[in-house]
Amino acid sequence: HAARNADAETYVQTNATAALAALANANATQRRQQFQHLMTQFADMDRIATYMVGRYSPQLRADQTLRRDWQIAFQDFAIATYEDQFENMSGAAIRVVGSEERTAGRDVVVDSQVRPPRGEPMRVQWRVLRSENGWKVTDIAVGRDGVWLGQIQQRQFLAQLDSNRGDIRALMTDLRGRTTAMRQRIMARS
């Protein structure tokens, strides 16, 4: 068995607890602001955004404006997605149950149980990487099957990019529209 990493486990426990608590804020604008702040601190959004476009990422290195615009559009989309999907997790509790180091002290998968106010607890795994800035989440897997959400999202984005000749700006336009629709749904439920 690979070694556990108590530091990574504490990082996930502390930050996931704070993110779940932010979802309990009744004021939708404040909830979004708190959640956005926590997610940008907790997750390596720049790394994730670059990963999402896979083989098209050289465009981001070649054009700093495109890179910045993509990172903003992706981050807004990701945060709206998590807020929309996990809104029913308001009041949930998380308990870290273990971890496995993939690379000692640097790449760790933290295993947890999230217990919603209603329903069965679910397994959530967090892949965290350590850099000079500390730990950051780079992907999560939800459920017994442990399917990594970032990998699923990347396949969807790559299929869209493949169909539009790698046009990241077209993908951004689509994401902005989807983000707006999600935010409208979230506000309507508030």
Image (cartoon, rainbow, N blue to C red):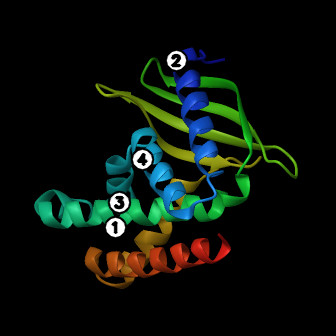
User: Which residue lies at the image location 34% right of the left edge and 47% below the top edge?
Assistant: 47
Mark toward the start of the polypeptide (3 vs 2): 2
Query: Could you say whether the residue bearing mark 2 is in a helix, strand or loop?
Result: helix
Q: Which mark is residue 54?
A: 3
Cα gap from disc 1 to disc 2, whole angstroms: 31 Å
Residue 17 is left or right of residue 176, and the answer is right
Q: Which mark is residue 37?
A: 4
Cα gap from disc 3 to disc 1, whole angstroms: 16 Å
- The residue that disc 1 covers is 73
- The residue that disc 2 covers is 7
Q: Are marks 1 and 2 in contact (CB under 8 Å)?
A: no
Mark toward the start of the polypeptide (4 vs 1): 4
Q: Are marks 4 and 2 in contact (CB under 8 Å)?
A: no
Hey, which residue is sitting farthest front in the picture? Answer: 27
Q: Nearer the viewer, mark 3 or mark 4?
A: 4
Cα gap from disc 3 to disc 2, whole angstroms: 30 Å
User: Picture coordinates of residue 49 (x, y %)?
Assistant: 35, 56
Amino acid of disc 1: Ala
